[in-house]
C-alpha cells in the first residue's frame, strides 16, 4: 500500500503504474494508493486515462494479436486476445457476465474459465492445426459475474509435436485458476486423413 502522496504525486504514480500494468482496475488502484475508487476515477479523468476495459481494448487493437494466431479463427477465440508470441507465450482477458454464472450464487460456471485457458493455450501454438490432448486443472477461488479475468499462458516444454502449456488466470492480481495442458500440433494432411477415416466408418 502506498501512503502520504499529494494529489500531484499520486496522479504521477498512477500514470506510471498503468503504463506498466494497464489491466489494473480502479478498485485495485484505490487499495494500492489508499484512497477511494471515486478518487481514482477523478484522477484518471484529469489525466485523460480511459477506464480499464477501454485500455484493454486499445492494447488489443494496437497489437492485432488475433491476426497472428494460426490454429484458431478470430471468432473461435474466447475472450480478448491481448498479446501473442507464437511458440512462446500470450495474454488474454475475459469480462465475465451474469449469463456465464449460476442464477442463485452468481458464481461463473467452470467451463467458461477453462475455455479461456484452453483457447489461449491453443492460440500460442505455432501450427495451423492444434488440439488439446490432456489437461490438469485447478480452480483456486470462485469467480463471480462481473469480475475481469486476465489469463497468461506460456509454452513450458516441447517434445516433437506435443507442447506442455502452463496457464494462470488472475482477477485483481489474485490467482483464481491454473492449468497445465498438453497441446498437440497436427499437419493439415493428418487432419484430412482423420476426416476420411471417420467418413468411411
Image (spheres, rainbow, N blue to C red):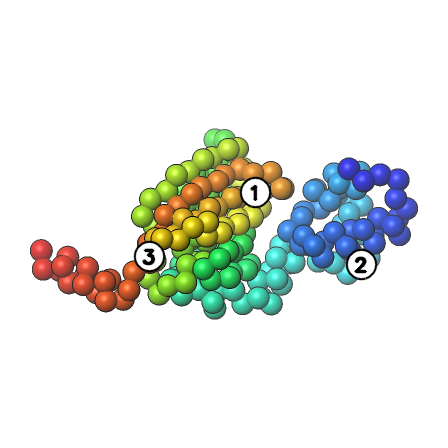
* Residue identifier under label 2: 47
Q: Is residue 91 above or below residue 114?
A: below
Q: Residue 136's image quarter?
A: top left
Image coords of residue 178 (percent x, y): 48, 40
Between the residue at mark 3 and the residue at mark 1, the CA separation in whole angstroms equals 29 Å
Q: Give whichever of 179, 87 is nearer the camera.
A: 87
Q: Disc 1 vs disc 2: Cβ atoms closer than 8 Å?
A: no
Residue beneath the point at 35% across and 65% down: 128
Mark 2 is surrounded, within 10 Å at the Cα level, by few (under 14), some (14 to 19) or many (20 or more) other residues, namely few
Between the residue at mark 3 and the residue at mark 2, the CA separation in whole angstroms equals 48 Å
* Residue identifier under label 3: 161
Q: Give whichever of 90, 162 is nearer the camera.
A: 162
Image coords of residue 85 (percent x, y): 51, 61
Q: Residue 39's image quarter?
A: top right
Residue beneath the point at 44% across and 41% down: 179
Between the residue at mark 1 and the residue at mark 2, the CA separation in whole angstroms equals 27 Å
Q: Quadrant of the N terminus?
A: top right
Badge 2 marks a residue whose secondary structure is helix
Mark 1 is surrounded, within 10 Å at the Cα level, by few (under 14), some (14 to 19) or many (20 or more) other residues, namely some
Of the numbered discs 3 and 1, the one sitting upstream in the chain is 3
Badge 1 marks a residue whose secondary structure is strand
* Residue identifier under label 1: 170
**Direction left: furthest residue:** 201
66 horizontally vs 6: left or right: left
Residue beneath the point at 62% across and 54% down: 53
Q: Give whichever of 128, 110 is nearer the camera.
A: 128
Amino acid at each position: 500500500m502506498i501512503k502520504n502522496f499529494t494529489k500531484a504525486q499520486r496522479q504521477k504514480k498512477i500514470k506510471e503504474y498503468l503504463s506498466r500494468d494497464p489491466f489494473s482496475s480502479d478498485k485495485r488502484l484505490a487499495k494500492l494508493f489508499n484512497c477511494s475508487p471515486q478518487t481514482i476515477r477523478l484522477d484518471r479523468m484529469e489525466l485523460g486515462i480511459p477506464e480499464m476495459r477501454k485500455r484493454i481494448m486499445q492494447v488489443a487493437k494496437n497489437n492485432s494479436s488475433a491476426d497472428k494466431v494460426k490454429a484458431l479463427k478470430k471468432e473461435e477465440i474466447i475472450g480478448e486476445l491481448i498479446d501473442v508470441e507464437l511458440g512462446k507465450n500470450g495474454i488474454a482477458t475475459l469480462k465475465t457476465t451474469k449469463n456465464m454464472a449460476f442464477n442463485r450464487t452468481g458464481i461463473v460456471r467452470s467451463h467458461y474459465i477453462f475455455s479461456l485457458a484452453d483457447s489461449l493455450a491453443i492460440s500460442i501454438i505455432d501450427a495451423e492445426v492444434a488440439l488439446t490432448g490432456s489437461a490438469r486443472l485447478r480452480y483456486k477461488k470462485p469467480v463471480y459475474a462481473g469480475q475481469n479475468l486476465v489469463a497468461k499462458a506460456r509454452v513450458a516444454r516441447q517434445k516433437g509435436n506435443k507442447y506442455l502449456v502452463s496457464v494462470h488466470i488472475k482477477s485483481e492480481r489474485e490467482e483464481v485458476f491454473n492449468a497445465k495442458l498438453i497441446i498437440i500440433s497436427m499437419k493439415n494432411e493428418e487432419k484430412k486423413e482423420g476426416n476420411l477415416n471417420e467418413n468411411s466408418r
